[in-house]
Amino acid sequence: MEKEKATFSKAFWTANISETLERMAFYAMFVVITLYLSNTLGFNDIQASMISGVFSAGLYFLPMFTGAYADKIGYRRSLLVAFLLLAIGYLLMALFPLLLQQKELVAYGQKTIFYGLEESSLRWLIIPIMIIIMLGGSFIKSIISASVARETTTENRARGYSIYYMLVNIGSFSGKSIIDPLRNVIGDKAYLAINFFSATLCVGAMLAIYFFYRSVNATGDNKSTREVWQGLLKVCCNGRLMMLILIVTGFWMVQQQLYATMPKYVIRMAGEGAKPGWIANVNPLVVVLCVNFVTRLMAKKSAPISMAIGMFLIPLSAMTMACGNLIHTDLPFSIHPITLMLVLGIVIQALAECFISPRYLEYFSLQAPKGQEALYLGFSNLDSFLSSILGFGLSGILLTKFCPDPATFATHEEWLAASSHAHYIWFCFAAIGLVSAFALLIFARVTAKKDKQQVTNTPS
């Protein structure tokens, strides 16, 4: 064991620790991104959701191209550029609201202060700032996992990726954990402080790369932009993979509501004392605890069957979340029904992820032509790209219709009437999950039949 552990290079540990810091910075910001855009800058629900969705989509789309560029200029230089962009972006997100005019906002008799210019186009300047973060983050997504591959051998690669996956989720859990304590102390100004925190973490990661990241495996495959586009065309022409991407997009549309809908929903329905950061943390905690067990449990089942089981859990998770608004009795330990059912729904959602995500990547890699596995896996993020746009966009529409901003109502009673059917939001996502589940079941049967026919027709 000690011999295997010693084979991990300093570059391996530096890359993984810097990834942990980046994940802490990102999730601390992202879990409250719609709250920041609405409560701090004054965007409405639809605007905030669309901006967040395009931002998330870009993070999953750009790695296909920033990764190719990283191969050209080297990983160390790319990581330095990435963390510099991230630090600048987060710092600007923290400073930008301070340049705007403070306003009083009246919500059914109670005055609060927020930073925003509802009638000014200046607030749209947040978009180029978010693009800076998007570019920096896209480099990280393409480089760190590749660094793990280059800094490990065939013998210890599985262990290397398990360490990588563990540290990613530690970063996710840690970043989300600071949100609620900050909100309790400084209220909506926490959204500014979080971005200062994220900028500081990225500076720390950049210094770690500068001083400690020295790799002998610095060169890449030198894929040209033309080769990347040719790879995209190959994937687009692969009907089986494109169908799988579209089906799994339904799963990720529901999963995206952890960031798109849940923070606003729980604060509006359960009160300002709700803790969206801790609720969101249920997901990485359950995944870390269960993913290896689930993977071993389903080892003898085909990837589509394992994914189909997870897909049928997704509508169940959404229906569980909807139940919070239907419980009208007091619960033990002063737990709000909305909070309890969200937590239970996210537990089911995380279990679904354990069944789906590892096997999705496995299936995708098995469909790739020999020698093009990395290229194909780079495009496996297309489902997250599509779900970011569709999931966040739909969230804004549904929040506006069924769980509107209390600040837009003169009295609390008017808002209660308008939000009485807030649980319909989760009914909509349950329907999407159910359609996706049946689609994947059909996909599994059709592809299994075709594969069997192909084996039968192959000359011996």
Image: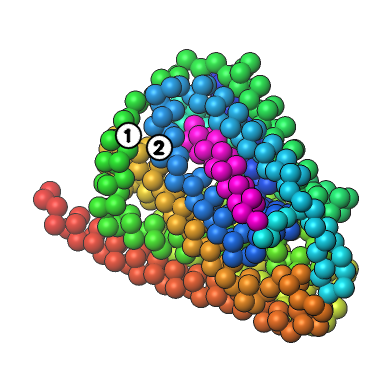
The first of marks 1 and 2 along the sequence is: 2
Q: Say whether marks 1 and 2 touch (CB < 8 Å).
A: yes
- Point out the residue furthest to the left here: 459
Residue at the spot x=19%, y=57% of the render?
454
Residue type indicated by callout 1: Thr
Q: Which mark is residue 344?
A: none
Tell whether position 255 is magenta.
no
Relative to the observer, which residue lies in front, 149 or 280? 280
Percent across and percent down for residue 84 are 60, 28
Residue shown at the point (35%, 70%) measured from the top left: 442
Residue on which the image places disc 2? 65
Q: Which residue is mark 1?
A: 225
**Of helix, strand and loop, which one carries label 1?**
helix
| Of residues 152 and 198, the one drawn nearer to the viewer in this rendering | 198
Relative to 55, say whether 308 is above or below. below
Report the residue at 35% width, 43% height from top. 376
Report the magenta residues as a range: 120-143
Q: Please, which colouring scheme is shown?
A: rainbow
Prevailing secondary structure class for the magenta stretch in the rendered image: helix
397 vs 79, nearest the viewer: 397
